[in-house]
């Protein structure tokens, strides 16, 4: 239990109580442009609130720590709000590097008359300096895996040059680091009682990439507690904050249920 700190509160209030540079990784998904109402709970979610939270996230993040911000825009009068990009740029103003704009590819049921079907959310990977942990998942099958390195390689000016003798003759690895577009199906049967759960695999893959065992991971918009569930399973300390009492209780039950 000392590895878990769960708060039923406003995350800005809790963030302000945390010591600076003590969080190694945040994996979180804020309310998307107020697309959903969460259990009828009145949530003060606007750009000013976001800005204050982002500043606090920068303060509490350890040097080399990372924030994974999973978000998407609302479509208003047929076009996107642009809030996601606006948020990413504000994180940069706070001091974060926009380390990578990753994509969570998923099929959405929303169809538009004059636009292609929306099939992704953003996963902005923001880092405080160079990420201190980056265990890239190596599960992409290499087309040339198992064959010998040979031939030429393209130079900066477009010309080709024979590969160096160091590389030549080496065997190409069977698997390489995956692309930054992750195709992860949303939970088929979401039995949590929360309307906007992200898949446990998404949380787990980020946790394993950007943190080590024993590190402290935060989810300041905990919802049903998916990040916390994965932290318990992967031996990370977890700080979770959820403003709504019903969702907080769901999260707490799910997370405590994973403790052996
Ligand atoms: C997109 S959901 C997160 C879902 C979560 N990733 C999961 O897998 O269950 C966003 C959550 O943030 C909560 N929330 C909104 N404003 C908040 C605030 N100021 N402090 C803490 N939680 C807040 C909402 O009640 C909602 O449950």
Image (tube, rainbow, N blue to C red):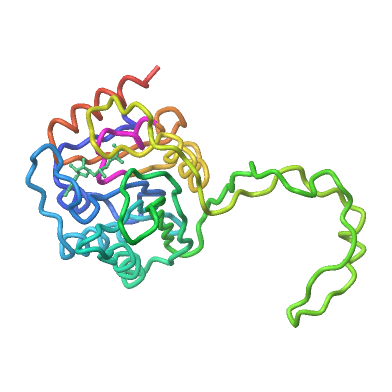
User: Where ligand 1 lies, by quadrant?
Assistant: top left
Please state the extent of the stretch shown in magenta in the rendering: 219-229
Q: Name the foreground residue: 12 vs 98.
A: 98
Q: Is residue 71 above or below residue 164?
A: above
Magenta span contains residue 48? no
Residue 216, percent from left and from top: 39, 42
Give the quarter of the image for residue 215: top left
Magenta span contains residue 225? yes
User: Left or right of 68: which side holds 255?
Assistant: left
Q: Is residue 240 above or below residue 94?
A: above
In the picture, the quarter occupied by the N terminus is top left
Residue 167, percent from left and from top: 86, 59
Residue 211, percent from left and from top: 48, 45
Q: Residue at x 70, y 43 (%)?
A: 141
Q: Name the foreground residue: 7 vs 45.
A: 45
Q: Residue at x 49, y 48 (%)?
A: 210
Give the quarter of the image for residue 154: bottom right
Q: Residue at x 64, y 41 (%)?
A: 139
User: What is the count of numbered marks?
Assistant: 0
Give the quarter of the image for residue 115: bottom left
In the picture, the quarter occupied by the C terminus is top left
Looking at this view, name the residue that lies furthest to the bottom: 157
Looking at this view, name the residue that lies furthest to the top: 260
């Amino acid at each position: 239990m000392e590895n878990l700190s769960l708060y039923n509160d406003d995350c800005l209030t809790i963030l302000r109580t945390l010591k600076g540079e003590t969080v190694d990784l945040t994996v979180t998904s804020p309310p998307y442009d107020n697309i959903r109402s969460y259990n009828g709970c009145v949530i003060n979610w606007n750009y000013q609130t976001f800005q204050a939270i982002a500043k606090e996230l920068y303060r509490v993040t350890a040097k080399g720590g990372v924030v994974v911000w999973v978000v998407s825009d609302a479509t208003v009068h047929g076009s996107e709000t642009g809030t996601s990009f606006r948020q990413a740029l504000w994180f940069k103003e706070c001091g974060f590097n926009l380390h990578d704009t990753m994509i969570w590819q998923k099929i959405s049921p929303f169809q538009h008359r004059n636009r292609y079907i929306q099939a992704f959310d953003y996963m902005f990977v923001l880092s405080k300096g160079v990420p201190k942990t980056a265990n890239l998942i190596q599960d992409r099958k290499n087309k040339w895996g198992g064959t010998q390195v040979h031939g030429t390689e393209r130079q900066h000016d477009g010309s080709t040059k024979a590969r160096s003798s160091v590389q030549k003759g080496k065997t190409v690895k069977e698997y390489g680091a995956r692309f930054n577009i992750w195709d992860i199906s949303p939970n088929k049967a979401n039995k949590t009682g929360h309307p906007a759960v992200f898949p446990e695999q998404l949380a787990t893959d980020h946790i394993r990439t950007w943190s080590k065992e024993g590190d402290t991971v935060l989810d300041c918009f905990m919802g049903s507690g998916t990040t916390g569930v994965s932290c318990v399973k992967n031996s990370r300390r977890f700080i979770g904050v959820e403003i709504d009492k019903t969702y907080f209780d769901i999260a707490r039950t799910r997370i405590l249920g994973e403790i052996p």
